[in-house]
Structures are given as C-alpha cells and as structure tokens.
Image (cartoon, rainbow, N blue to C red):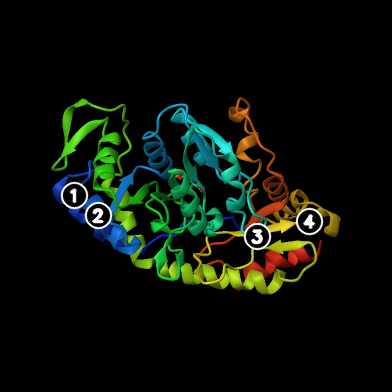
C-alpha cells in the first residue's frame, strides 16, 4: 500500500510552470522585486481586497518584519496553540509573548480572556486563525480599539477563508499569510503581509532589502533600519502565479475529502471534530480531530502509532504548546487549560487536494476499528 502523508503540495501542470518562467530566461531578472513578484503582489491584493501586499521569502520573515515595528520589551497577547513561528517572531523582535487561552470550539484565541491580560506594556494582539478557523475578529477589533492596540493576524492557515464577503486577509491591521509548500496556496517558500498602509509597504520593502530605502524598485546604498534579506525570488512568484489559477479548484477537492471525513467520523463517541463555522467560507486547510481518552480507552498517541503502522502519517499539530517550549521558560505564564487539553488530544489527519474517498475511508476504518 502506498503511504499517505499528512499533506501533499499542490503542483500546477508542468508546462504551465515552464511557460510562466520562460520570460525569466529572457530578462535574467531573478529576484529583487521583479515583474513576477510585482504581478503576484497585485493579483493577491485584488483577491484579498486590500491595497497593499508585501511579499517575503517566507511567512516567518514577514512576521518578523511586523514585530520589528514595536519597541523592544513590549508585550504581545497571543495564543500558545500555534506553530513555533508565531512565538519565535515575537521573541526574536525582543517582545514578550503573553499567552492567552483558546476557546474549545475552534481552537482560536478566547476573546473573553484577552482584556485581563492587557497591561501598560501591551502593544498588540497577535491571534492565529488556527486551521483556517476564523478568530472572533469583530470582538478582538473592539478590544484593540478600546485599548489602542494593533491587531496582527497570523493568517498562515487562512488563504481563501471568507466571512461572508470579507477575506480573512482584511481582518486586523496587518495579516500574515504563509505560502509555504504545505499550505493551501503556495510559492514553494514565501509569504506576505496584507494591509492598507503604503507607509508600511515602504518599511517592509526596506526591511527585506538590508534596511536600505527602496525607491522606484531600487535599493539605496546604506542601511537605515536593521533589516535583513527576505526577498521572494521570481521562480517562487511564478509558482504563485500558476497556483493562483488553480487554488479554488484545489479548495473544492479538499472540501470533498473533508466532507467524507465528517460523514465517517461525526457522532462517534470520544472523537471530536471542529464544527463548521456558521456563515464562513472555509478553505479546508486541515482536518484536526480530538481523541478523548476517557471515552475511547486509548489516546491520540495510540491513534498516531496505529495509523503509522498502516503507512498513514498524521501529525500532532500543535503539540506541545509554544508556551511549553524551552525558549519560553523565562516568560511568566498564565494557565491555559483549554489549549493544554486540545494540544494533548488533537491529531491532524491527512488532508490535501486529490486525497480520494477510498483513502479517507481507509484512514477512518483504521480509527474506527481501534
Ligand atoms: C506555516 C506557518 C507559519 C510560518 O510560515 P512559513 O512560510 O513556513 O515561514 C507561521 N504561522 C503558522 C501558524 C504557520 O502554520
């Protein structure tokens, strides 16, 4: 039997990509905000409904650029139930992560628990649309407004998610989207910041080009801020242009697989699926399932092991909590019991465009026979 991995990168037709990169041979413009980069930024801005899209070499660098705008030593309220990148970007900018618990339904930050964590040092709230589940962004926006805080969304999982007409990329002051190979939409490696502030676009352009001021696409001669190198190459942008043409079909295929999982696993005692969010257009980025050991008599780790014996590779995503990482040992921590419980029980099952009904059935059969 072929192995089934937790994710599989989408690929455009081979000829479509080679056609897209042909002009790079002619121009020899390989990186430094070339024509592909510019075209991709424009198309994404249109799709997201924002005026500015700043592209980066990866999503993590984009997050680092955002957090660099705050004064060192400031506090950022965030979630421990996320990928390492969110926490690392905060810490690497010299900021202090303050971990807020999550809600039990969609595993996103619990808006009811944010205000108690605000101190005079708080500058921002950095929630994550975990698995593409949208945060309670209206409430979070109100809290931020009341306390004069910025809202920086880690929207790495949320490409294509919409709340009625509104794209996930529009929900805070700035949203970061990751275009890593494993994400719903990818540029092999890549990421962006979506926002509406041309002044920030200038800052981010400079930050990713050694802190040199960028004018008419040209970088200056000296570093004016402590920037870095985080440019998206033309080959990556070309992959993005191709994938953008197919991403909606890909999401439709993901949906089929996700719905099959729901048919097979809904209502099984001790197996908890995230309910679908009302009025939200999902991107079916992940298939998180919680396994309740008290009901089942076995644990999430047992499921992971049994699946892997059958050549099926699920992932403990996210375990452990970021707040439990050694790099966070020095930070004061609140109890986040809901996040702890979800992190102990959750397993992301394989989900990607092209995962067949038969394959979903095989996976569910293994789980249901335990
Ligand atoms: C993937 C991911 C990132 C980092 O993005 P890269 O493009 O891989 O650097 C950040 N946060 C979350 C939640 C992610 O899943």
Quadrant in which residue 21 is drawn: bottom left
Q: Is residue 193 above or below residue 325?
A: below
Residue that label 1 marks: 25
- Asked if disc 4 is less than 8 Å from ligand 1, the answer is no
* Element marked by disc 4: loop
**Circle 1: element type:** helix
| Disc 1 within 8 angstroms of ligand 1 (CB) | no
Q: Badge 3 is on which residue?
A: 105
In depth, the one of 45 and 259 nearer the eye is 45
Q: Which mark is residue 21?
A: 2
Measured Cα–Cα span from mark 1 to mark 2: 7 Å
Q: Are marks 1 and 3 in contact (CB under 8 Å)?
A: no
In space, the residues marked 1 and 3 are separated at their CA atoms by 50 Å
Name the residue: 36% across, 35% down.
69
User: Mark 2 vs ligand 1: CB under 8 Å?
Assistant: no
Q: Are marks 3 and 4 in contact (CB under 8 Å)?
A: no
From this view, report whether residue 130 is shown above or below residue 320: below
The residue located at (75%, 62%) in the rendering is: 271
| 3D distance between C-alphas at marks 2 and 4 | 49 Å
Asked if residue 74 is positioned above or below residue 106 in the image, the reply reads: above
The numbered mark, 3 or 4, whose residue comes first in the sequence reads 3
Q: Earlier in the sequence, mark 1 or mark 3?
A: 1
Dot 1 and dot 2 residues touching (CB under 8 Å): yes
State the residue position of label 4: 292
**Within-10-Å neighbours for mark 1: few <14, some 14–19, many 20+:** few
Q: Earlier in the sequence, mark 3 or mark 2?
A: 2
Q: Position of residue 352 (x, y in %)?
A: 53, 62
Q: Earlier in the sequence, mark 2 or mark 4?
A: 2
Disc number at residue 257? none
């Amino acid at each position: 039997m072929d192995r089934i991995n937790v994710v599989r990168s989408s690929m455009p037709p081979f000829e479509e990509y080679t056609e897209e990169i042909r002009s790079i041979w002619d121009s020899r413009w390989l990186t430094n905000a070339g024509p592909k980069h510019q075209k991709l930024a424009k198309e994404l801005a249109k799709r997201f409904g924002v005026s500015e899209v700043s592209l980066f070499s990866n999503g993590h660098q984009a997050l680092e650029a955002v957090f660099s705008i705050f004064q060192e030593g400031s506090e950022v309220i965030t979630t421990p139930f996320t990928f390492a990148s969110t926490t690392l970007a905060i810490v690497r900018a010299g900021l202090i992560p303050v971990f807020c618990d999550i809600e039990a339904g969609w595993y996103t930050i619990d808006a009811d628990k944010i205000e108690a964590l605000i101190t005079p040092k708080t500058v921002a709230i950095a929630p994550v649309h975990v698995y593409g589940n949208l945060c309670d962004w209206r409430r979070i926006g109100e809290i931020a407004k009341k306390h004069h805080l910025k809202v920086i969304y880690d929207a790495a999982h949320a490409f294509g998610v919409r709340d009625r007409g509104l794209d996930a990329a529009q929900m805070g002051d700035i949203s970061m989207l990751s275009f890593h190979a494993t994400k719903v939409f990818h540029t092999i490696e890549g990421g962006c910041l979506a926002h509406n502030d041309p002044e920030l676009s200038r800052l981010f352009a400079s930050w990713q080009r050694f802190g040199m001021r960028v004018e008419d696409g040209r970088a200056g001669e000296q570093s004016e801020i402590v920037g870095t190198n985080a440019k998206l190459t033309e080959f990556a942008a070309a992959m993005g242009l191709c994938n953008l043409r197919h991403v909606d079909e890909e999401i439709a295929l993901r949906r089929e697989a996700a719905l099959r999982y729901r048919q097979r696993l809904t209502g099984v005692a001790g197996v908890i699926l995230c309910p679908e969010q009302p009025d939200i257009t999902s991107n079916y980025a992940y298939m998180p399932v919680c396994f309740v050991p008290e009901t089942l008599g076995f644990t999430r780790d047992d499921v992971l092991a049994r699946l892997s014996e059958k050549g099926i590779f699920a992932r403990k995503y996210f375990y452990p909590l970021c707040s439990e990482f050694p790099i966070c040992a020095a930070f004061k921590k609140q109890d986040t019991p809901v996040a702890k419980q979800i992190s102990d029980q959750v397993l992301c099952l394989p989900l990607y465009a092209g995962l067949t009904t038969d394959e979903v059935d095989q996976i569910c059969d293994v789980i249901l026979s335990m």
